[in-house]
């Protein structure tokens, strides 16, 4: 990381309170609507999430759905053809034995086609093994028709049609195997008839053709079958390639949209700061206020200096109108109470706090030189492995200190993680305990409400439940996901959609979004982002150590098994 990065000061961001869906989703929110939320209701009632709609999440899914759709169209045609043949068969001549065999073949093929249609109604049963058996039964039915009408008759065209249908299926192994079966069956039947091993009861026979002419005619039929199979497989490959190209393009667009949303919000926030404020040049406590360096719904943050020593500080003020609200004032002072407990180089230091009777409630804290993580991510999108280990390790130490003090931050996100420079020293610090909750208090000041930043909040936080330190561990894992993959773990068209995804879904597999990463990274993040708090790491340091090992492909075997077990029950999403 270069040292010529534009210097900024730490801006502890007060939570923004919104009352309608569609608000910027990377902002801290507190949903005060007293009406019941569907997410919390479903989770607490034990009903779980409603079944998601059937969508093609990946190219493989799209190919499967296309095959199911083709089968649903093809099966009625096949059954209809069989029924029509059975109805007109009494008006044909032909050998009685061959005719009876054809009747039996029609019954077998129609039954197999009907079973295939049932499989299309339950995609989980639409497997390669079941389809192979169905196709084999259809081949038997087709070749009873070939034998009845004759190996030199147009009945062989039915084989061509079926072979093309099989050839465009998603399974190359099954399609090749069935092609080989068709070749063997056709060669065996035709050869047995040509060489007299089996009587030719066909309605169309070789007639005056010599044996050489018969063999050449069958060779041409085999050539048509081969060309049909090759065209079908090439069609399938080109379709799959086109779908994969489309999938990559869609994922890239989604990634850019997420980054643009982050950048837009940061630009909005940046445009609100940097100039004089209402209290500029006034003295509060021991500090003289300068320009505004941060604004939020609850107040402003000013650049300030100590009136006696000249030491720099950041002074956070509560808006006078908001300060008249006892609840907001209590919450503001609780921030000071929570932060004052913490003694860690990885947590912004608190210098001075106003008393409850102050006309303008304020607190003075450490003023940092550097920039926050969101600023860095706007320029670099992702971080290198060494930077990731440094970031997560430093923040983990601060969170573990907060845990020991009984403090839960509840709003760990890139805007609240600050890389402070002091000479050659680099240190990540946690900002803004403004929405923290003390572990020895019952609940929070916003009982039953959702407080935090949607794309980084834990599932239990999104449901408005009481949280503990493990909610911060989840948020740290979500930040790790962001700096590794280049995108937030969740998105959505509006706030309710994002909260739904947080509660019920897993994000896309990290190693699918970032190249050259060990699969151990998927496992470490699977534990960190576990939906249930009890499935996560025991401490932030444990997560930091596991992620460090995972980036080197050296995750502990026990953690690998633990993560794999979690992913069986709750696999990564195939797309976001």
Image (cartoon, rainbow, N blue to C red):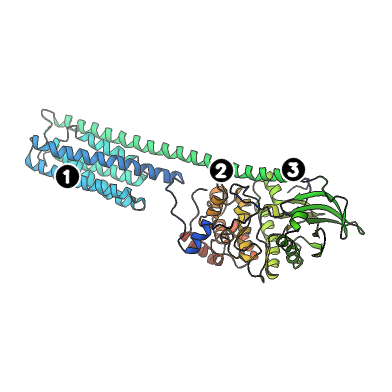
Distance in Å between CA atoms under marks 3 and 2: 26 Å
Q: Are marks 3 and 1 in contact (CB under 8 Å)?
A: no
Crowding around mark 2 (Cα neighbors within 10 Å: few <14, some 14 to 19, many 20+) is some
Residue position for label 3:
271
Crowding around mark 1 (Cα neighbors within 10 Å: few <14, some 14 to 19, many 20+) is many
Residue position for label 1:
105
- x and y percent of residue 319 in the render? 77, 54
- x and y percent of residue 452 in the render? 64, 57
**Residue 400 occupies quadrant:** bottom right
Residue 57 disc label: none
Residue 348 can be seen, yes or no: yes
> From the viewer's perspective, is residue 178 above or below residue 206?
below
| Residue pictured at 10% horizontal, 44% vertical | 100
Residue 319 can be seen, yes or no: no
The answer to whether residue 525 is left or right of residue 298 is left
Residue position for label 2:
254
| SS of the residue under disc 2 | helix
Q: Are marks 3 and 2 in contact (CB under 8 Å)?
A: no
- Give whichever of discs 3 and 1 has the lower sequence position: 1
Question: Which mark lies nearer to you, 3 or 1?
Answer: 3
| SS of the residue under disc 1 | helix
Query: Who is closer to the viewer here, 453 or 146?
Result: 453
- x and y percent of residue 250 in the render? 52, 41
- x and y percent of residue 312 in the render? 85, 55
- Give whichever of discs 2 and 1 has the lower sequence position: 1
The residue positioned farthest toward the top in the image shown: 208
Query: Who is closer to the viewer here, 40 or 424?
Result: 40
């Amino acid at each position: 990381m270069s040292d010529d990065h534009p210097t900024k000061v730490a801006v502890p961001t007060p939570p923004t309170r919104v009352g309608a869906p569609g608000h910027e989703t990377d902002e801290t929110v507190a949903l005060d609507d007293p009406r019941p939320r569907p997410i919390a209701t479903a989770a607490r009632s034990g009903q779980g999430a409603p079944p998601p709609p059937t969508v093609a999440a990946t190219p493989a899914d799209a190919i499967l759905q296309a095959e199911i759709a083709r089968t649903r169209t093809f099966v009625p045609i096949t059954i209809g053809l069989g029924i029509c043949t059975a109805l007109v068969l009494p008006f044909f001549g032909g050998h009685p034995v061959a005719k009876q065999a054809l009747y039996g073949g029609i019954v077998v093929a129609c039954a197999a086609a009907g079973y295939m249609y049932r499989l299309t109604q339950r995609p989980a049963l639409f497997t390669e093994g079941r389809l192979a058996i169905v196709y084999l039964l259809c081949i038997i039915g087709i070749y009873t028709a070939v034998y009845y009408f004759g190996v030199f008759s147009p009945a062989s065209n039915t084989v061509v049609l079926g072979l093309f249908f099989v050839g465009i299926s998603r399974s190359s192994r099954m399609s090749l195997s069935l092609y080989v079966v068709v070749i063997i069956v056709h060669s065996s039947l035709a050869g047995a008839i040509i060489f007299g091993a089996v009587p030719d009861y066909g309605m169309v026979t070789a007639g005056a053709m010599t044996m050489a002419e018969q063999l050449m005619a069958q060779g041409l039929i085999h050539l048509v079958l081969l060309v049909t199979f090759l065209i079908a497989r090439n069609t399938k490959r080109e379709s799959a390639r086109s779908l994969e190209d489309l999938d990559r393009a869609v994922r890239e667009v989604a990634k850019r949209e997420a980054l643009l949303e982050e950048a837009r919000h940061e630009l909005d926030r940046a445009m609100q700061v940097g100039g004089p404020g209402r209290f500029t040049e006034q003295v509060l406590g021991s500090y003289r206020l300068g320009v505004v360096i941060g604004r939020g719904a609850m107040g402003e943050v000013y650049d300030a200096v100590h009136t006696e020593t000249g030491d720099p500080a950041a002074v956070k003020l509560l808006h006078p109108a908001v300060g008249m609200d006892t609840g907001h004032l209590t919450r503001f002072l609780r921030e000071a109470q929570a932060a004052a407990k913490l003694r860690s180089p990885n947590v912004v230091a608190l210098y001075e706090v106003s008393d409850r009777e102050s006309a303008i409630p304020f607190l003075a804290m450490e003023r940092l030189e550097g920039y926050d993580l969101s600023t860095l991510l706007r320029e670099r999108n992702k971080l290198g492995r060494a930077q990731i280990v440094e970031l997560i390790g430093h923040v983990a130490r601060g969170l573990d200190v907060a845990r020991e003090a009984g403090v839960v931050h509840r709003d760990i996100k890139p805007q609240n993680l600050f890389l402070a420079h002091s000479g050659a020293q680099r240190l990540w610090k946690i900002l803004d305990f403004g929405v923290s909750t003390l572990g020895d208090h019952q609940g929070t000041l916003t009982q039953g409400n959702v407080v935090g930043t949607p794309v980084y909040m834990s599932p239990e936080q999104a449901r408005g439940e009481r949280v503990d330190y493990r909610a911060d561990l989840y948020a740290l894992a979500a930040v790790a996901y962001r700096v590794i993959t280049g995108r937030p773990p969740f998105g959505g068209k509006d706030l309710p959609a994002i909260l739904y995804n947080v509660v019920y879904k897993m994000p896309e597999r990290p190693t699918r979004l970032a190249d050259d990463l060990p699969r151990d990274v998927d496992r470490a993040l699977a534990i960190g982002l576990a939906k249930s708090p009890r499935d996560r790491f025991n401490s932030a340091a444990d997560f930091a150590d596991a992620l460090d090992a995972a980036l080197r492909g050296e995750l502990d075997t026990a953690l690998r098994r633990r993560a794999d077990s979690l992913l069986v029950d709750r696999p990564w999403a195939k797309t976001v």
